[in-house]
Image (cartoon, grey):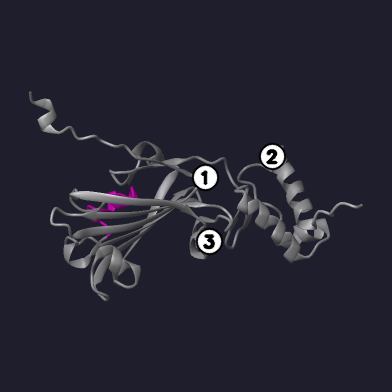
Amino acid sequence: MTGSVPSRRHDIADDLRSQIMTGRIQPGERLPSEAGLADQYKVSTATLRNALAVLQAEGLVEKIHGKGNFVRRPLRKIMYVGGWGTLDPWTAAEPALSVTVRTATVRAHGHLTTLLKVPTGSPLAEFSCVSLEGESPHGLARIYVPRDLAPAGMLDDASSCREAVTRFAVTGPPPAAVRETVCARPPTPDEASSLRIGSAGAVLAITRIATDSAGRVVEAALLVFPGDRVDAVFTTHHVIDERQTQG
């Protein structure tokens, strides 16, 4: 009885993986063009791309649009601190890590109306953020604040809340309560593209809702991190009943 014959894409993936693991191809190095690799392995471009997709899903290779395929540099994790709702300053403030921020006014729709408890069409201030180490993305954040709660100039580049946004933190005054829902799931196509990860990998998705003392939602944040690039830490503080201390 003959065994199954390994597919060519796995043969190619195994060969490239071996070159990466043994250091023949260095971290940060650009791979030959897809056409060049297809010619080298004597396969179609489609088969070659399938082989690269295997390595992209494993986190060994990342495709940078318009530039080519590169060996990913060793992963450096950042830390998300639950409760405080922020990236840990020690891991997020290193010179190699930067955050790009785009601001806009948008209308509430779909799940945003549910998260923020506002009518459809309500104006919201939106912050779209990407944290990067060099050109490698570490995380995505979309932060929404009801427009009537946004301080004057909040969307300006010189806004005082810009520093908070670059830490993926709650942007306004300290809220009365912060609720964070955390799950691991496959990335959406847009997330996979933005984070340059394979669709087979997992992301850590955090939905953070901040409310004031009256129970009004003052901010909703949708945070997404590649599963291999973040640790999330949550600390529980036990409240001691005063009656237990009397006696």
Q: Amino acid at mark 1?
A: Asp
**Which residue is at 32% across, 50% downward?**
180
Confirm or deny contact between disc 2 and disc 3 (CB under 8 A).
no
Query: Is 26 in front, or is 189?
Result: 189
Q: Which residue is mark 1?
A: 228
**Does the segment drawn in magenta span residue 161?**
yes
Relative horizontal placement of residue 184, taking residue 59 as reference (left or right) = left
Measured as percent of width and height from the top left, residue 94 is found at: 41, 39
In the rendering, which numbered label is found on residue 193?
3
Relative horizontal placement of residue 244, taking residue 201 as reference (left or right) = left
**Which residue is at 50% across, 58% downward?**
187
**Does the segment drawn in magenta span residue 30?**
no
Classify 34 as above or below 20: below
Q: Amino acid at mark 3?
A: Ser
Q: Residue furthest top?
A: 247
**Magenta region, residue range:** 157-169
Q: Residues within 10 Å of mark 1 (few under 14, many from 20)?
A: some
Of callouts 2 and 1, the N-terminal one? 2
Q: Residue furthest front?
A: 247
Classify 225 as above or below 79: below
Q: Residues within 10 Å of mark 2 (few under 14, many from 20)?
A: few
Q: Residue furthest right?
A: 1
Characterize the magenta stretch by its predominant secondary structure. loop
In the rendered view of the protein, which quadrant contains the C terminus? Answer: top left
Q: Which residue is mark 2?
A: 21
**Which residue is at 56% across, 53% downward?**
201
Measured as percent of width and height from the top left, residue 37 is found at: 76, 57
The CA span between labels 3 and 1 is 16 Å
The CA span between labels 2 and 1 is 18 Å
Of callouts 3 and 1, the N-terminal one? 3
**Which residue is at 70% across, 60% downward?**
50
